[in-house]
Amino acid sequence: MTRLLLFKKPASTRAFYDTLLFEGLDLIEWHRRNQCLMSPSRDAKGDDVDLSIYRGKLLLIVNVASKCGMTNSNYTELNHLYEKYRDQGLEILAFPCNQFGEEEPGNNDQILDFVCTRFKSDFPIFGKIEVNGDNATPLYKFLKSGKWGIFGDDIQWNFAKFLVDKNGQPVDRYYPTTSPLTIERDVRKLLGLS
C-alpha cells in the first residue's frame, strides 16, 4: 500500500519535510502527491516543472557542476547517451549543485549558457539545488532514501547518478566517478533493448 506517514506536527516547513516517511511511492507519484507541500522543481530558466511529464520515461538524474575535474567527460558522455537513447525513452535530468568544492558558482543563466554553448546539451537543465543537508531538495531526499548499502545517505561529490525506471522507482545509484558510458548496459536493459 502506498502511503505517507507523519509522525508529529512539525514546528516548521523544513521539519515537515524531515518527518515524511516515503513508503512504496515512486518518484512521479511522490512528487504529484506532495507538490503542494514543497516548492516545485524549477528548470534553469525559473519555470516550474511537473515531474509527471516524465512518466513512462527512464530517468538518469545527475547532480552536475561546471568547474569539476569530471565536467568535460561527464557532459560529453551524457550527451552521447542522450543522443543515442532519447528516442527510445531516456531522459537525463541535470541538477546543478555548488555544495562540493564550490564548483558550480554561477547563477542559473550562466550555468545554462555554459552547458548549452560548450557542450551543446539538449537534455533538461534544472535550477541550482542542494543535494545534502537541511536544505536538500525533496527530490534528492527521496532519491537518497533507498537502501543503497555502502553509499550511505549523502551524495559524495558532483556527478552522482541515479537511474529511475519507467515506473518512477529508483533502481540504481552510481558513484560520481562512474563514467556515464559504463552504465549504458543498465540503460539498455531498463529500456528493454538488450
Image (tube, grey):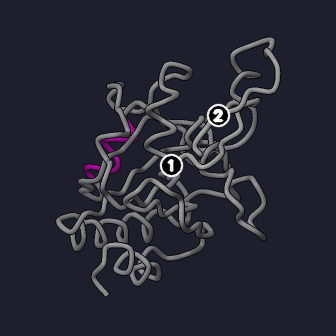
Q: Report the residue that reaches farthest toward the front.
A: 1
**Which residue is tagged 2?**
4
Tell me if mark 1 has few (under 14), some (14-19) or many (20+) residues whose alpha carbon lies within 10 angstroms of its own.
Answer: many
Vertical comparison of 94 with 10: above or below = below
Tell which of 124 and 51 is nearer to you.
Answer: 51
Q: Report the residue that reaches farthest toward the top.
A: 11
Side (left or right) of 86 relative to 35: left
Tell which of 51 and 77 is nearer to you.
Answer: 51
Residue 39 location, x and y as percent? Answer: 51, 22
Vertical comparison of 164 with 111: above or below = below
**Which residue is tagged 1?**
26
Q: Residue at x 36, y 57 (%)?
A: 92
N-term-proximal mark, 1 vs 2: 2
Residue type (three-letter) at the residue carrying disc 1: Asp
Q: Residue at x 60, y 49 (%)?
A: 24
3D distance between C-alphas at marks 1 and 2: 12 Å
Which picture quadrant has residue 136? top right
Residue type (three-letter) at the residue carrying disc 2: Leu
Q: Which region is colored magenta?
A: 110-117
Residue 127 location, x and y as percent? Answer: 44, 34
Q: Secondary structure at mark 1?
A: loop
Tell me if mark 2 has few (under 14), some (14-19) or many (20+) residues whose alpha carbon lies within 10 angstroms of its own.
Answer: some
Q: Secondary structure at mark 2?
A: strand
Q: Residue at x 76, y 29 (%)?
A: 19
